[in-house]
Amino acid sequence: MAEQARAPKIVTHSHYATSFEAESEAEVYDPRKEGLVREMLDALGEDAEREGLKRTPLRVAKALDFLTSGYQMSAEEIIKKALFEEDAKEMVIVRDIEFYSMCEHHMLPFFGHAHVGYLPNGKVVGLSKIARVVDVFARRLQVQERLTNQVADALMEHLGAHGVAVVMEASHTCMMMRGVQKQRSTTVSSAMRGAFESDPRTRAEFMSFVRG
């Protein structure tokens, strides 16, 4: 496998006050979620005040705000901040972008790698911004098919590229931990735009790079 392109960490939180301002790792989060988690623990028959669970509502609230921080991000802003005029015509591919998302049906994680390619049309974008665009849409309640299409559409629209291709491979814990309980299953989805959709040779070239 070729060397991996790692997505940089992005931390964006909702603008609400935390009830633990003195805490060294304090982050801004929505306190309503803390109360809802406490109610859920009560519904499960747990004692939300016992030692191991006292801070759980806070931790879950903060985790949810981070895992859904994509709702406060803009793919357009990310791309436009690092868009450069360049007379490049050859295919650009960023492989093996790690992503983590949450299935909207069960609110359980799915995770894997995204492979993104585009054909420049007089402009190129900073490579890290491609990974950030993946995060914009992955950090929401999602289904993999829509996630794949949203990444492709955002890049196609804001890059003005001749074409965009996105392939995502993911493991879904909603299939691994419950239901059919198939721990080794992998789901692959793709979205082709522009030349990648209309030209089989362009699409085949991209897929050959993705497969390594």
Image (spheres, rainbow, N blue to C red):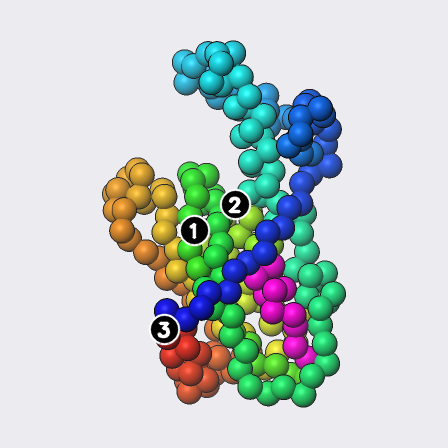
Q: Nearer the viewer, mark 1 or mark 2?
A: 1
Q: Quadrant of the N terminus?
A: bottom left
Numbered circle sitting on residue 211: 3
- Point out the stretch of residues depicted in magenta: 123-134
Sequence order check: which comes first, mark 2 or mark 3? Answer: 2
Q: CA distance from mark 2 to mark 3?
A: 28 Å
User: How packed is label 1: few (under 14 Cα within 10 Å), some, or many (20 or more)?
Assistant: many
Q: Secondary structure at mark 1?
A: strand
Mark carried by residue 141: 2
Q: Secondary structure at mark 3?
A: helix
- x and y, in percent, of residue 10 in the image: 62, 50
Quadrant of res 21:
top right
Give me the residue at 43% from left, 40% from top: 108
Dot label at residue 21: none
Label 2 residue SS:
strand
Main SS type for the magenta part?
helix
Question: What is the spatial separation of the Cα atoms under label 1 and label 3, in whole angstroms?
Answer: 19 Å
Q: Residues within 10 Å of mark 3 (few under 14, many from 20)?
A: few
Q: Position of residue 112 (x, y in %)?
A: 42, 55
* Number of the label disc, if any, that sits on residue 111: 1
Callout 2, which amino acid?
Leu
Q: Is residue 82 left or right of residue 42?
A: right
Q: Residue 146: in sight, yes or no?
A: no
Q: Would you say the residues marked 1 and 3 are in contact, meaning their CB atoms lie under 8 Å apart?
A: no
Instruction: Tell which circle, 1 or 2, labels the residue nearer the N-terminal end.
Output: 1
Circle 1: residue type: Phe
Real-space CA distance between mark 1 and mark 2, rounded to the nearest whole angstrom:
13 Å
Q: Is residue 23 above or below residue 63?
A: above
What is the x, y in percent for residue 148? 49, 61
